[in-house]
Amino acid sequence: MKHPLTLAVLLALSTSAFALDTPKFDPQRLSDEVKTLSSDAFEGRGPATEGEKLTVAWIIEQMQQAGLQPGGDLKEGKRSWTQAVPLLRADIDGTPRLDLDIGGKVEALEQGKDIAVRAPLDGSKEVSIDKVPVVFVGYGVSAPERNWDDFKGMDVRGKLLICLVNDPDFETGKGDFGGKAMTYYGRWTYKFEEAARRGAAGLLVVHETAPASYGWPTVKNSNTNTMFDIVRKNPAQTHPKLEGWIQRDVAADLLKRSGLDFDTLKKQAQTREFKPAQLKDVNFSAHYAVRSEVITSHNVVGRVEGSKYPDETVLFSAHWDHLGIGQPDAKGDRIYNGAIDNATGTAALIELGRAFAHAPKPQRSVVFLAVTAEEKGLLGSEYYADNPLYPLATTAGVLNTDALSPLGPTRDFSTSGKGSSQLLDLLIADGKKMGRVFKPDSHLEGGYFFRSDHFSFAKRGVPALSFGSGSELIDGDKAAAEAEQGDYGKNRYHQPADEWRASWPFTGLAKDLELLYRVGSDLANSRQWPQWSGDSEFRAARETSAAQRK
């Protein structure tokens, strides 16, 4: 690998987009695309539904009209517009029976109200768990490199585990897990994986809004509908039989009736001295049928071929899917339209593709990847990264767009989570040239770095980031913008109310795309290979493929 990319080099780049006219992006076109894609006609864009068929066809049509070339699977020697993504799809058939036996008295837990269990992702046709012991395991973390073990040698095979969400450092803001910044140990995906590795019958994560960074409606809506996973050879190594969440007050009451105090146990769990606690005279049962099958969803892929280095790639990504048709809200609305999340990012992807298709050809190829099943656990990007259409070793960087702001222009911009790399340096440098200031993610405790599609690439070493629109409006009240964001997180995120609004100007998103275009063009017209920072957990993976880059 030649010419290490330093910030000085980045600031000196002048042969790329800055030497050309940066294209202007049309706010009205962006608004129209978001309005269309998030309309009821697309049925919430659920994977493997009629909504997917409509969505994929629409995106292909937009990419064709934008001037892109197909960049998907090879069929008879030619690229198609899609990449087939085989997925396991599972639904709970009917109402699950979920019971607690406390001292011989059986009490039912209500799905969606007290508890939110997911359909199993191991291909099974039923779940039958009968009177298994219940164990509180703190944060459910086993981290030898941090000298941390919440299990203390306890055999939890065949038991139901209950654990806290986020990291042990969340409340105190200091400790061995990055303080407020969530590590992967804080993600519920890790906690399910650890429970599976230990042979537990199931795991329930205790929901609290602050450490989860979203309310119970989001948990309910995301976990009680159709579940998906990539097809795995040994799913039991990743998923316990039962995965789900439990309301904080329900869990606290359960512990109290077992002679334990929730707050006391939580404080103990924030220390290395914590020991798991089996609940006295408490057993758990779960019985329900499952509809499970393997289906095929699709990523949509457009491409502009490079003029000099067509085998090297700069990749833009966004997820096209949302939650489809699900539980009705208070108004009876069952369509989860996903206007912000992620019709905005998909529209951005299409318009970036249009801009590159109508500009002088970049030296490197630029790929525009609209992925499926992000809402099911980053599955479309995970499948692509595991089965790349274009080698990851020669993918210079990934720029992801997810849930962008449709409001006015801002002085600042951000990224999801903390991921220091020279790709981020390039974004900051180009933003500075546009008069914009980078503001680091102010909610690192939310673990957003692990919750967008760029993570599928980052964990394999590819420099990747997920762009975030700013909050300091040039024409407007910062407090009002933050209130808008707060309202979205509380009342619209992953709810039917995430709908297009005629009042949205989309002028800020148009400016965001100018910045993203500049970054992508700079990288596509350079010989630079960004690297992760020296202390990044992803740097080693990137270094293993260095010999494949010129």
Image: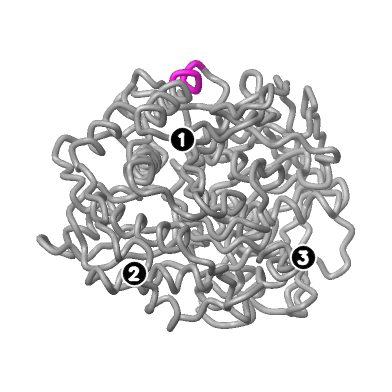
Q: Which residue is mark 3?
A: 276
Q: Residue at position x 69%, y 22% from top? A: 76
Q: Which mark is residue 320?
A: 1
Amino acid type for the residue under numbered disc 1: Trp
Q: Closer to us: mark 3 or mark 2?
A: 2
Q: Which residues are magenta?
A: 50-54
Q: CA distance from mark 3 to mark 1?
A: 41 Å
First along the sequence among labels 3 and 2:
3
Residue 269 locus on image (x, y percent): 66, 71
* Magenta stretch: helix, strand or loop mostly: helix
Q: CA distance from mark 3 to mark 2?
A: 50 Å
Q: Residue at position x 57%, y 68% from top? A: 529
Relative to 366, is 504 on the left or the right? left
Residue 55 locus on image (x, y percent): 44, 24
Relative to 390, is 235 on the left or the right? right
- Position of the N terminus, as image quadrant, is bottom right
Q: CA distance from mark 2 to mark 1?
A: 27 Å
Amino acid type for the residue under numbered disc 3: Pro
Residue 249 locus on image (x, y percent): 52, 52
- Position of the C terminus, as image quadrant, is bottom right
Relative to 442, is 449 on the left or the right? right
First along the sequence among labels 2 and 1:
1
Q: Quadrant of residue 123?
A: top right
Q: Is the residue marked by circle 1 packed among few (<14), some (14-19), or many (20+) residues within 10 Å?
A: many
Q: Closer to us: mark 3 or mark 1?
A: 1
User: Front-most of 122 and 357?
Assistant: 357
Q: Can residue 156 be seen at all in this image of the molecule?
A: yes
User: Front-most of 410 and 68?
Assistant: 68
Q: Which residue is mark 2?
A: 430
Label 3: which secondary element: loop
Q: Quadrant of residue 339?
A: top left
